[in-house]
Image (tube, helix red, strand yellow):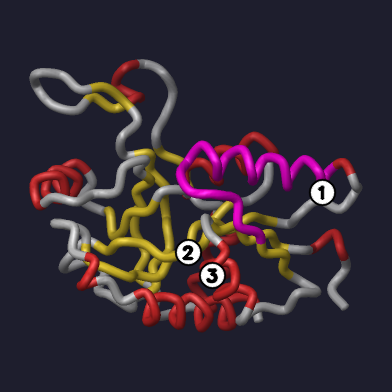
Amino acid sequence: MTPAHSRLLIVTAVAAEADAVRAGVDPAAVEVAAVGVGPAAAAAGTARLLALAEAAGRPYRGVVSAGIAGGFPGRAPVGATVLAARTIAADLGAESPDGFIGVAELGFGTSVLHADPDLFEALSRALPDAIAGDILTLATVTGTAGTAAALQARHPAAVAEAMEGYGVASAAQTAAVPFAELRTISNPIGPRDRAAWRLGEAFAALTAAARAACG
């Protein structure tokens, strides 16, 4: 059995994502938890799990934010697996008459957190077909062509968007625990069209990715 101190923590937003991940991993080596939807819930839930593990003398060797996501058309198609080289809080900042001003430009820190190089490399080796790039974290999911185009223009390396990665990354950074983000694509980013979502395909891809990376 894998020693307790070398466990990997994988956090998802909802139970369906957690179930898909659990179906592909070794429970002796990986703990999976659903911590809630959105960056605030993700940060709070992840921070609690990391603190409890550290207090018990069984810290995690890393934490991965995992789940389904929207993919930017032409960059990450439905069913694809994506890995974040960087996780970006894309709506953390201020509006202005001249456009969006990011939190870094405002002088209040950074909206960009990098994946741990070793953990990112290990996931990339295990998932050679995964698409690497930036994954955006948004508190409000994109639902119009205009917002999708604006995000693509501001973030030319972005491949996908989700709602939890930056929160998980912030908790990991505070706890000095390596972080990575892994997603599978359920729908194209743009005008909201539930009929175009392929949840079953994305969940199946999530199980396959978890098995390849951590099974």
Which tag, 1 or 3, sits closer to the chain's start?
1
Q: Secondary structure at mark 3?
A: helix
- Crowd band around label 2 with a 10 angstrom C-alpha radius: few (<14), some (14–19), many (20+): many
Between the C-alphas of marks 2 and 1, the distance is 22 Å
At mark 2, the secondary structure is strand
Of the numbered discs 2 and 3, the one sitting upstream in the chain is 2
33 relative position to 208: left or right: right
Stretch in magenta? 33-54
The picture places residue 62, in percent across and down from the top left corner, at 67, 56
Pick the front one: 27 or 86: 27
Q: Which residue is mark 1?
A: 53
Q: Residue 119: x and y, percent?
A: 59, 61
| Mark 3 closeness class: few <14, some 14–19, many ≥20 residues within 10 Å | many
Measured as percent of width and height from the top left, residue 151 is found at 19, 45
Q: Secondary structure at mark 1?
A: helix
Mark 2, residue position: 67
Q: Are marks 1 and 3 in contact (CB under 8 Å)?
A: no
Residue at x 88%, y 68% (from the top left corner): 3
Q: Label 1 amino acid?
A: Ala
- Find disc 3 in the rendering and name its residue: 123
Assess whether residue 134 is covered by the magenta stretch: no
Residue type highlighted by circle 2: Gly
The nearer-to-camera label among 1 and 3 is: 1
